[in-house]
Image (cartoon, grey):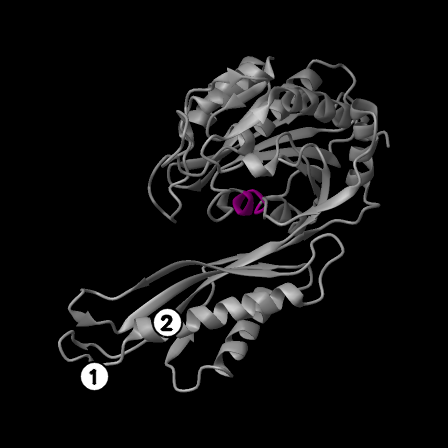
Amino acid sequence: MDALKTLKDLIAIPSINPMRANSGEAAERAAIDCLETLLRSARIDCERQTVVDGRENLIAIVHAGSGRSAQDGLLLNSHIDTVPVANMAIDPFDPVLRDGNIFGRGSCDAKASIAAMLAALLLHAQRPERPRPVLFLATVDEEFSFAGSRRFIERRWPVSAAVVGEPTELANVIAHKGVVRWRLQVRGVSAHGATPELGRNAIYDGARVTVLLEQYASELNRRGGHPLLQHPTLNVGRVTGGQAVNMVPDRCEFEIDRRVLPGESAAEAIKDCEEWLRKRLEGLDFNLEDPFLDDPPLETPADSTIARSLQVAQHSVLGTPSPCVGAHYGTDGSKLAAAGIETVVCGPGNIAQAHTKAEFVEVEQVNLAVRLYDQLIQDWGRI
């Protein structure tokens, strides 16, 4: 199978995450259809797993050879959904090949990983010697709430380790931050815009909150950190408030993104932020809602079987093993790890190109990824 052709085909199929829960949109279905057709044409067993109405994971399995173990297999996972395409500087669904790069939405994050993993799986399926089962998982909704990976781990699968495809430039990522997101609401008193003294302007109070949240974020940056992930971070991503220009607003709402380190919990992160604010905002009426996303961090030991196996494959394919590193973004991997599956993150492309106006992935990275995943599969069960 030509991984580059598959990548181009996938880029040409929109699979935009609607970025909201229960949208009712079959956002990834056409791309899942494409993958299933390729797998079934190669006579590989696969099934769809409903995540929410209209959105399904695709799971394929290449079974171990006759008389070999049906357990302790290897999982290759990446996501088929992409972020939106508004304001892109290129045609997001025209997979142009130029200067050794393939352009298009999802080219880097993460359809290159999907295409490379699929190519490696098809190579493995043709071999008579297969010591362990190998599974391929294309998840939906990674870009919003990780619903696909959360659904996958509700069942037991014959795997003990996983590689999650994200743009790491084929580095061996063994740790990444988690994220907790919540809303903070500031309450005021509504009044006519002509008599603002009769109300309390929630946006003015919200401005005070904004300044303090910036100070709090700076304090987080100075706190002790993780050897691979440094310090936690906080970002205010959205602010809304008011009903009409001639009314004193009685509400101002913030959406807050807090990246957490291994060992931190969502509850602790929110409580710490609230206590810090309340010490400095006497007389201001505000509350913090329960999180609308609570996603754990990932931390896999550097001496784990999957981390060592990936380094062996890297040495064989790339000429040198990658040092174990960390990443600041989240992946499906932390959900797999929470289910007891040893997990690392490794895929083609540079994260700096993900979600950009002219997203691209290097062709060489895709070709190397096919070889790297294939080598890892061949080694699995022997190391």
Question: At numbered mark 1, what does the secondary structure look like: helix, strand or loop?
Answer: helix
Task: Specify the quadrant of the image occupied by residue 310.
Answer: top right
Does 237 sit above or below residue 210? Answer: above
Numbered range of the magenta stretch: 149-154
Amino acid type at image mark 2: Gly
Q: Residue at x 57, y 26 (%)?
A: 361
How far from the left and from the top, in percent, is residue 350? 61, 34
Question: Any mark on residue 197, and which?
Answer: 1
In the displayed orientation, state which residue is furthest to the bottom. Answer: 283
Does 254 sit above or below residue 311? Answer: below
Chief secondary structure of the magenta portion: helix
| Distance between the alpha carbons at the discs numbered 1 and 2 | 17 Å
In the displayed orientation, state which residue is furthest to the right. Answer: 383
Which residue is identified by label 2?
Answer: 206
Question: Any mark on residue 148, and which?
Answer: none
| Mark 2 neighbour density, 10 Å: few (under 14) some (14–19) many (20 or more) | many
Q: Residue at x 27, y 76 (%)?
A: 201
Sequence-wise, the earlier of marks 1 and 2 is 1
| Mark 1 neighbour density, 10 Å: few (under 14) some (14–19) many (20 or more) | few
Is 150 a magenta residue?
yes
Q: Residue at x 52, y 45 (%)?
A: 151
Is 305 a magenta residue?
no
